[in-house]
Amino acid sequence: MDFLPFYQEYLENTLSRSKFLLLQILVWLLQVHKQVRIERLAAYLPIPILYESRRKKIQRFLGECCLSLTLFWFPLIKLIVEREFKPGSRLTLALDRTQWQDKNVFMISVVWRKRSLPIYWILLEKKGSSNVKEQIALIRPVLRLFSHYGGEPRYMQNSAR
């Protein structure tokens, strides 16, 4: 599957034209300037408005409910899985937790062609491993998303950090 045209088509159909263009510009800025701080992105954003207005524009865009995991990412990942896996086939899900600076990220992915596609993630409010309650909170939305795929659930837990 060629992901770039697929993502582009999905984004164009999901976002308004102005939001799609802003997303394109932000991705370009991230690639060129290798900065993820809103203040830096606002400084480079090529829109003829005041710096503070550019910063607020980026903040509002990133806070949009249309970009939430369940409203934006879940339908996209569901389309990818539906194109690559037949209904009723078995999906392999992988759980992983990683520490990224001061963030403890707990993630679930679907394994596809020796790769993991991230589906859902939560930030743990502590250092160290997850507990059963956090694991259920991570897995439950994904099981609902892929309820039409059969077979006994099989999970792979990555212990490598």
Image: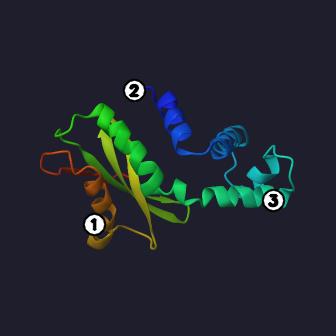
Rendering colour mode: rainbow
Say if 65 sits above or below 109 in the image.
Answer: below
Question: Where is residue 16 drawn, in percent x and y?
Answer: 61, 45
CB contact under 8 Å: marks 2 and 3: no
Please give left or right for residue 115 compared with residue 153 in the image.
right
Query: Residue at image x 70%, y 49%?
Result: 35
Q: What residue would you read off at disc 2?
A: 1
Indicate which label's residue lies in the foreground, 1 or 2. Answer: 2
**Which dot, 3 or 1, sits closer to the camera?**
3
- In the picture, the disc for residue 53 is 3
Residue sitting at x 70%, y 55%: 58
Q: Secondary structure at mark 1?
A: helix
Seen at 18% across and 41% down, the residue is: 90
| Pointer 1 residue | 136
The residue under label 1 is which amino acid type? Ile
Judge from the rendering whether residue 13 lies leftward or rightward of residue 91; answer left or right: right
Find residue 71 and report its horizontal and vertical position in percent: 45, 55
Question: Is residue 112 visible in this depiction of the protein?
Answer: no
Count of numbered badges drawn on the protein: 3
